[in-house]
Amino acid sequence: MGLENILPTYHRSPTKLPISLNKLCRSKERVLLGFVCFGLVVACFGTVFFLPELRTGIALPSINSVYKVYEHVQKVGPEFILQLPPLAKDDVHDGKSQQHHGQIDKPDFHLLEDQARLRAKIETEERLELEQNQLKVLPKPMIPSSKSEAGDSRSTLSNGSFKKESDKNIVDQPKIRLPKVQGGDDVEPDIKAKRETVRKMMKHAWDNYATYAWGKNELRPISHKGHSASIFGSGNFGASIVDGLDTLYIMGFMDEYKRGRDWVEEHLNLTGVSSELSVFETNIRFVGGLLSCFAITGDSMFREKALHIAERLLPAFNTLTGIPHALINIGTGTSKNYAWASSGSSILSEFGTMSLEFNYLSDITGNPVFRQKIDQITEVIKKQEKPEGLYPNYLNPKTGRWGQQHISMGALGDSFYEYLLKSWLQSSKTNDEAREMYVDAMDAAVAKLIQKSNGGLTYFAEMKFGRLEHKMDHLACFTGGMLALGGTHLEEPLKSKHIALGKAITHTCHESYDRSNTKLGPEAFRFSDAIEAKALKSNEKYYILRPEVIESYFVLWRLTHDVRYRQWGWEAVQALEKHCRVDGGYTGVKNVYSDEPTQDDVQQSFFLAETLKYLYLLFSDDELISLDEWVFNTEAHPLPIKKVNPFYRSI
Ligand SMILES: *[C@@H]1O[C@H](CO)[C@@H](O)[C@H](O)[C@H]1NC(C)=O
Ligand SMILES: *[C@@H]1O[C@H](CO)[C@@H](O)[C@H](O)[C@H]1NC(C)=O
């Protein structure tokens, strides 16, 4: 089956149909049309009810599109059927939001707001003001008890997300179909069981963190105490809590989620803290994690915390070019770069990995400053001539000139490329600049860096001062998923080319796992006449619970439904259980080629955020955090796609 069937493009403008109909038809016809559509809804609903397997949307694309149409009618909801005139924007927003740049001209596709407007109209006058205040933020979803953990997420969410009183007032109101963020069990018992194993791994990792290192950044699972890396500065910022929360929620661990959420509310506060933080890591783990929780749950506390932290990062952008520094002292606001980075350069993968979070933050807070910072970075890097079209890893923030000519799809480069693609997708494909930059960057990278080994393995080499180094980082293995995901959204001939490359790279990365004794992959692997897809130096042989290979399995599974990706994911689960699981959580290992590797005694926060989340989703159905509705930030925190995902929650 073709990939085009899996990622339908008609999701892009779900409200197009009713808008044009509203314009075309006069009121009588509209009433009539309303009845006809209502009949259709009933008919479609019947069909879907009696053929539940259609819901999975895997096997039968044509019937599936009927279901999608039904969903769209559902989404359009009572405003269409009941013929209520849409309220003017002034009726729903207060004066403040009018000032936000670009807000008024943009068409409002916000489905939930449509629903909410209707609600406001029906409510009595004295309720109106209260309702309007609630509209700015979606009401907090009800937190189900742990008993309903495995329950149907749709009913839980739609029940929790809407006010009871309005439900009473609207007779036969069709339910909005919200993005699925919980549930999503596969029908096959074998896959169900595998997913349950992953879920228990999360429980084991989380419970031990909560027992031995609560509030600390990370857990030392063997010595049973807290751990922190320099990227987190000197404070206890609960990195594992913030990174793990959306995973807990998606897996339905609601008691654990609630406890983490309350910790964030009470303790995550940078006011008065003096500590030097990595701007990049703080953005992808903290800002990204909080934004994801805000999108998924609608709990505005997360938005406030994300804003609070992102604001503390802003002084790092006060450089001559607007390219941010790598490190910021959040107490003093002074910032600087790493001394080792090409005479004080900023790093491509760091300043190039802010856009998803910052653009989203501007949209949900109405504060344009975050988007402006991103636009400035884009302007600077677009202006600089790229050596043979390639982006070097270093850029001087004073001059805007490239530093050392190192080019890599792994460390120091990686997520810059990912964010070009995903910025385009996040914008519902309206950000053509990001698309163009992605396509150009990949054209050059594929032409200059893609290599094939003697044994036929495809890989991304690195380039240093014009010479290829035949080494690929574990970090670079995310490119398998990225190329395939990008390919599905591009036109031929790039489409087939990128999808094929994505598969080939993922195959190579699997080989790097398969060729080790532990069946875990090394930090970096090389290709020469003597070795293929194996680490050479001792400092390349470790595995620290990284997600990138599993991430590509997950993306390729969603795009192709080739069972090999689930098999490979399961191999990784078994290897993790065998070599990384200890009584106190999960640890990395120092040498993947040893039968009994030494353990490093660190449970990385990204194991909770990324590795376990991608494994869980690999064994879930496609609707759970659908790739049509979400983009994952580089820490695997799902962020909603504008216009198609009602959880976007724009102000
Ligand atoms: C929705 O939640 C309310 C409590 O908030 C409960 O009384 C009601 O029975 C729930 N409805 C459904 C359909 O679960
Ligand atoms: C952080 O704490 C200060 C008081 O120390 C408080 O005024 C502020 O609102 C808090 N910020 C957040 C985002 O919780």
Image (tube, helix red, strand yellow):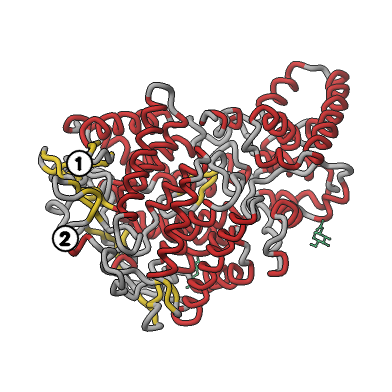
Q: Which mark is residue 537?
A: 2
Q: Position of residue 573 (x, y in %)?
A: 46, 61
Q: Is 105 drawn above or below residue 600 in the view shown?
A: above
Q: Which residue position holds label 1?
A: 392
* Disc 2 to disc 1, C-alpha distance: 25 Å
User: Image quadrant of residue 519?
Assistant: bottom left
Q: Residues within 10 Å of mark 1 (few under 14, many from 20)?
A: many
In the image, what residue occupies the spot 14% across and 49% down?
A: 530
Q: Position of residue 504 (x, y in %)?
A: 35, 39
Q: Is residue 276 left or right of residue 202?
A: left
Q: Residues within 10 Å of mark 2 (few under 14, many from 20)?
A: few
Q: Does label 2 or label 1 sit earlier along the sequence?
A: 1
Q: Which mark is residue 108?
A: none
Q: Nearer the viewer, residue 535 or 625?
A: 535
Q: Position of residue 300 (x, y in %)?
A: 59, 58
Q: Is 378 drawn above or below residue 258 in the view shown?
A: above
Q: Position of residue 363 (x, y in %)?
A: 52, 44
Q: Nearer the viewer, residue 253 or 350?
A: 253
Q: Is 369 drawn above or below residue 103 in the view shown?
A: below
